[in-house]
Image (cartoon, rainbow, N blue to C red):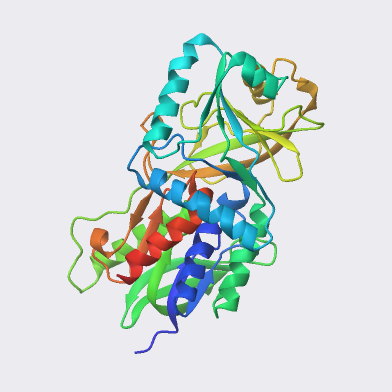
Amino acid sequence: MTPDIDTMVVGAGVIGLAIAHKLANAGHDVVVLEQHNSIGTETSSRNSEVIHAGLYYAPGSLKARLCIEGKSLLYRFAAENGITVKRIGKLLVACDSDEVSKLEDIASNALANGVDDLVYLSGVEAQRMEPALNCVAAYLSPSTGIIDVHALLLALEGHLQAAGGSVVLASRVVGITRSASGFRLELAPASKNGENAPEDSAAAITCRRLVLAAGLHTSKLATQFFQSEAKSPAPKLVGYSPPETYYAKGHYFSLAGHAPFSRLIYPMPGAGGLGIHLTLDTAGAARFGPDVSWIDAIDYAFEDPDGARHHSFAQAIRRWWPDLPEHLLAPGYTGIRPKLAPQGSPPADFAIHGPETHGVQDLLALYGIESPGLTASLALAQYAADLLTT
């Protein structure tokens, strides 16, 4: 039986679109399914828009390798497609003497990853570059930058369409089973008010190859599929269970005014994240965050009913910007990171599982694609395409 579609990608964030673009350019008939009414509405549009240099990730990890490769690819892609990108650099700062050893550890880790452009600065030298900054030492990362993520998403979608692929919006995958031609996906449309339609209204579509790039939802979709496989008359798959995804919610505050910095400012990382740092968007607006709040269900509400979060942000920022005008901090937005390690555990690497991992031909599932997923997106797309087509 001939499937409806050759290759289906679930998820129209930057990762799903990048993979679809790569596969379509290689000659595949590709359709991307997106549950929302526009592309990139979850993780892709709720981050810091930073192109990372590759400082923090474990040497030899996928995060390190794909970040380094993806950084160059992303700068080139932006230049070729008229996407606003600025290589403004960042300062990684130690705010007191107790943090200097941690700063040096990060610099050593970066060098092990192949990042050889860091520049050490004394506190005085850093303050000459950024007079409002308070620190005792810093490293300048000149290859760190920022990018217009919305323009990147549109460019990837445009390239996909030019190669014959398409994106189908408001199509929520509610079930995946095996079919005679590959995979059968049950789809439920989003209702007009943006809420989910009942699952009993689902339609179905079949495909030969399937890529699960659904971010926060990949673990759930993969678990549904492998549970259905275990109940099927066909031989059961043994020894594979999809990894669990944990939700780490991050709040961002914006600054209602001009920040006296021309570079990104990053303090020492904290548990579960990179600390309350300053990023600038391509228009120059400042935002601070994210923090880390572990949650059990997807919820983008900005939570600060008593102002305690506002106060804690201000305290954290004042460690490296003592003159912060706290009254100009305003609630911004939230994002949720799909993490593969629970609260209190060491950070986990990307998990990109193809047939050699789970035993199902023509199925690829991407789990835990958090930072530096944006930076790594184009390199990750090539890596994923190779796994799927090998």
Please give the name of the residue rendered at 60% of the width and 68% of the height, measured from the top-left corner: 157
Residue 329 to residue 144: above or below: above
Image label count: 0
> Residue extending furthest bottom?
1
Which quadrant does the N terminus fall into? bottom left
Q: Quadrant of residue 5?
A: bottom left
Does residue 168 appear anywhere in the picture? no
Q: Nearer the viewer, residue 378 or 299?
A: 378
Residue 120 as seen in the image, left or right of residue 185? right
The residue lying toward the viewer, choosing from 307 and 364, is: 364
Residue shown at the point (47%, 68%) measured from the top left: 22
Residue 368 against residue 190 in the figure, above or below:
above
| Residue in the picture at 42% in, 48% down | 368
On screen, residue 74 above or below 51: below
Q: Please say whether residue 224 is visible from this viewpoint.
A: yes
Snapshot quadrant of residue 240: bottom left
Residue at the (43%, 34%) spot, across then down = 110
Q: x%, y% of residue 256?
A: 81, 32
Q: Please state the horizontal and vertical placement of residue 96, each as a whole percent of the image.
A: 54, 11
Q: Position of residue 94 (x, y in %)?
A: 54, 18
Task: State the residue lying farthest toward the right.
Answer: 257
Query: Residue 172 location, x and y as percent?
Result: 53, 66
Q: Quadrant of the C terminus?
A: bottom left
Horizontal arrangement in the rendering, residue 163 relative to residue 339 (left or right): right
Q: Quadrant of residue 224?
A: bottom left
